[in-house]
Structure formats: C-alpha cells, structure tokens
Image (tube, grey):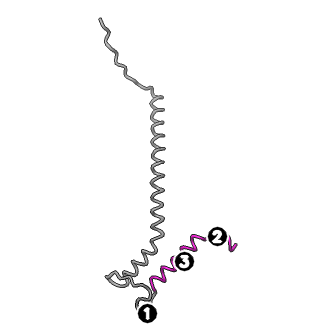
C-alpha cells in the first residue's frame, strides 16, 4: 500500500509572524517615503513657479477688473494722454514687484555687503 502524500501547511510561529509583519511595514514605509519625497519635490517646483508668476497675474487681474468687462492690454505709450491721467499704471506696479522680487532673492548678498 502506498502512503498518502502529506500536505505540509507552513505555519509561522508568533515571533516569525511579528518579524515578517515588521519587515513588511518597514519596506512599505520606505517605499512610501520615496514616492512622497518625489511628489513633494515636483509640487514644490510647481508652486515655486506659481509664486514667481503670481504678482504678474495679480496685476493683470486688477487691471482687468478696473477697466471693466473687456480684456484690454494697452502698452505703455500707446495712448497720447495716458501718462498724465490719474491712477497708477499696471506696468509701474509690475516693475515695483519685480524690484522687490530681485531684492528678496539677493537679500543675503546685500546683507553681507552692508554689514
């Protein structure tokens, strides 16, 4: 008579189960951190570009809201009496914001130069 094949069920002891679960959690945590780091690096680059462009977008939106419903971008000097009218020019505001951006970016070198 042939012996019936035994089915071997692999059971882990509680300490082996704990070790396997801990290793799985550590590997998943490390992979999650790598993916999170890549996503955050990409998001920070996009937000940095948005922060650089946002003053210009703000100037365009304020200009659009002040002129009415039509979207009109006059260039400086396109109207003969435009410079003598009351009110500020959006180009002047944009240049002041650009100057502030330049001063903020190079603040450490200006600080070393002065002090």
Q: Does label 2 or label 3 sit earlier along the sequence?
A: 3
Find numbered disc 1 in the image and state the secondary structure of the residue it sits on.
loop
Q: Check the picture and name the quadrant holding the C terminus.
A: bottom right
Density class for disc 2 (Cα within 10 Å; few <14, some 14-19, many ≥20) is few
| Picture coordinates of residue 83, whole percent (x, y) | 45, 91
Circle 1 is placed at which residue position? 85
Assess whether residue 80 is covered by the magenta stretch: no
Helix, strand or loop at disc 3? Answer: helix
* Residue range corresponding to the magenta coloring: 89-115
Q: In the figure, 46 relative to 35: above or below?
A: below
- Identify the residue position indicated by label 2 in the image: 109
Q: Residue furthest front?
A: 78
Measured Cα–Cα span from mark 1 to mark 2 = 39 Å
Image marks 2 and 3: residues in contact by CB distance under 8 Å: no
Mark 3 packing: few (<14 Cα in 10 Å), some, or many (20+)? few
Disc 1 crowd rating (10 Å Cα; few below 14, some 14-19, many 20+) is few
Dominant SS type (magenta): helix
Residue 99 is tagged as 3
| Residue at the image point whose x is 40% and y is 81% from the top | 63
Q: Quadrant of the N terminus?
A: top left
The correct choice, above or below, for 21 with respect to 41 in the image is: above
Q: Secondary structure at mark 2?
A: helix
The reply, left or right, for residue 92 in relation to residue 2 is right
User: Residue 42, position in %: x, y?
Assistant: 46, 57
| Residue extending farthest left | 1
Q: Is residue 91 in the magenta section?
A: yes
Residue at figure coordinates x 48%, y 79% from the top left? 94
Q: Residue at x 67, y 70 (%)?
A: 112
**Residue at x 53%, y 73% (from the top left corner):** 101
Q: Earlier in the sequence, mark 3 or mark 1?
A: 1
Q: Quadrant of the rendered structure where residue 3 is?
A: top left
Residue 57: % across, % down: 42, 74
């Amino acid at each position: 008579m042939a012996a019936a094949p035994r089915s071997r069920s692999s059971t882990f002891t509680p300490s082996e189960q704990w070790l396997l679960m801990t290793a799985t959690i550590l590997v998943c945590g490390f992979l999650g951190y790598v993916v999170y780091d890549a996503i955050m690096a990409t998001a920070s680059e996009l937000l940095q570009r948005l922060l650089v462009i946002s003053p210009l977008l703000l100037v365009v939106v304020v200009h659009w809201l002040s002129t009415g419903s039509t979207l009109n971008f006059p260039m400086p000097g396109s109207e003969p009496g435009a410079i003598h009218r009351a009110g500020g020019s959006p180009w002047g505001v944009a240049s002041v914001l650009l100057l502030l951006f330049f001063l903020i970016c190079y603040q450490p070198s200006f600080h070393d130069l002065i002090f």
